[in-house]
Image (spheres, helix red, strand yellow):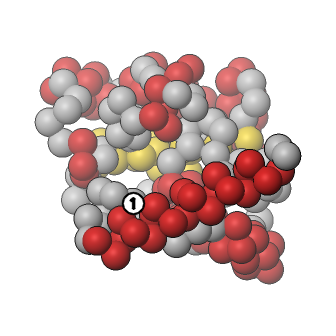
Amino acid sequence: KFDKNKNYIFFPLHYTDDAQITVRAPLFSNQLSLIEMISKSLPYGYSLYVRGHPNNLGFNPLSLYKKINKLSNVRLISPYIPPHEVIKNSKAMIVINSTAGYEGIIFQKPVIALGDSFYWKNGLTFDVKEINNLPIMISKAVNSPKINQESIIQFIYKLRKISYKGKSMSADYSNKNVAELTNSVLKKIEGLTSQNG
């Protein structure tokens, strides 16, 4: 059950075999071990809410969820609960490098980032550079004030400035989107080749 009134930290399961993990954060490919580590690092009175990725249903073995369910301070919640509802009622979030971390920033939630991402090292997240520091970072995060809204606006402005047109191919297969993505990739390549002479 999802009890939004509890003191909880939110961890969204990342998509199995996603390049975000396999290429950019292979250290965290065993998400069960990571959840067990987070469970042991939680402050007294806190729970960890783990939400499965809705596009990953059926890819993880049932044994993974059974093992997660056995952890006394961990609650496995439905992947169909809207993520924004889980984020806005959380005391903090822990992510590897998913876009859920960016959403947490927008909701002015403390985000504990374990892996390299586009929002890492921007002063908006609690970046864990050494996994042994996880308990300290969790404690700092849950006791921190809200992120300054002006800093978030500046960050979003910078992101938009360096972004290209186009949606993820998993979100939009239309000819218009394919053309926008293609043009964006070509512009990026042109920019890189002009920088390298």
Residue drawn at 56 percent across, 20 percent down: 27
Q: Is residue 84 above or below residue 129?
A: below
Q: Which residue is depicted at the point 45% across and 64% down?
A: 181
Pick the residue in front: 7 or 126.
126
What residue occupies the far front of the structure in this picture? 197
- Report whether 10 appears left or right of 122: left
* Image quarter of residue 108: bottom right
Which residue was labeled with disc 1? 168
- What amino acid type is highlighted by mark number 1? Ser
In the displayed structure, 162 sits above or below 185; it is below
Q: Position of residue 56 (x, y in %)?
A: 24, 42
Residue 87 to residue 48: above or below = below
Q: Give x and y (percent) for residue 146.
A: 72, 69
**Residue found at x 18% / y 24%:** 61
Q: Is residue 174 left or right of residue 129?
A: left
Q: Secondary structure at mark 1?
A: loop
The percent position of residue 124, horizontal first and vertical second, equals: 75, 59
